Image (cartoon, rainbow, N blue to C red):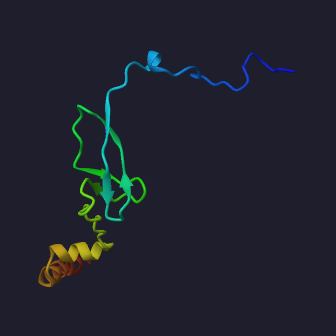
Amino acid sequence: MSSGNAIRGSRVGAGPMGEAERGESAPRVWVSFWCSNRHETRPSFATDAAVPETWECPRCGFPAGQNEQSPPAPPRAEPYKTHLAYVKERRSDADGAAILAEALNRLRQGA
């Protein structure tokens, strides 16, 4: 017994997918890219498209280049810095002491 008008096993947009529906596909070229983990990726590009210098490796996310012997270096992960570390990069200890003295003077005068 069937419920409704749905045809079993079909979905919206299902049907024959041929070049008649999609149009002509552009001629393609496959280019190999290697990451520093030696993963090979072979995306395809239209023959008249510019091939990028690097491509993101889908396995590890590192940049991949076309030279298998010399792949791009993996990105350097910067260590986590606290707010205080960033402040210390911008200000010397003498600057910090002067700012603290100024703030203490304002507090003492206002109290």
Q: Quadrant of the N terminus?
A: top right
Task: Pick out the residue farthest to the right.
Answer: 1
- Give above or below for 15 relative to 57: above
Q: Nearer the viewer, residue 98 or 73?
A: 73
Q: Nearer the viewer, residue 21 or 111?
A: 21
Position of residue 28 relative to residue 41, above or below, is above
Q: Position of residue 43 (x, y in %)?
A: 35, 44
**Looking at the picture, does residue 47 appear above or below residue 82?**
above
Count all numbered tags in the image, as a single digit: 0
In this rendering, position of residue 69 left or right of residue 10: left
Q: Answer with left or right where residue 62 lies relative to residue 52.
A: right
Vertical placement of residue 4 versus 57, above or below? above
**Residue 108: percent from left, percent from top:** 22, 81
Residue 94 at x, y percent in the picture: 12, 84
Quadrant of residue 64 in the image? Answer: bottom left
- Seen at 31% across and 69% down, the residue is 77
Q: Residue at x 56, y 20 (%)?
A: 16
Nearest to the observer: residue 95 or residue 12: 12
Residue 86 figure quarter: bottom left
Q: Quadrant of the C terminus?
A: bottom left
Answer left or right for 26 relative to 94. right
Residue at the spot 18% in from the left edge and 75% down from the top edge: 89
Residue appearing at x 25%, y 63% in the figure: 69
Quarter-of-image position of residue 99: bottom left
Residue 39 x %, y %: 38, 59
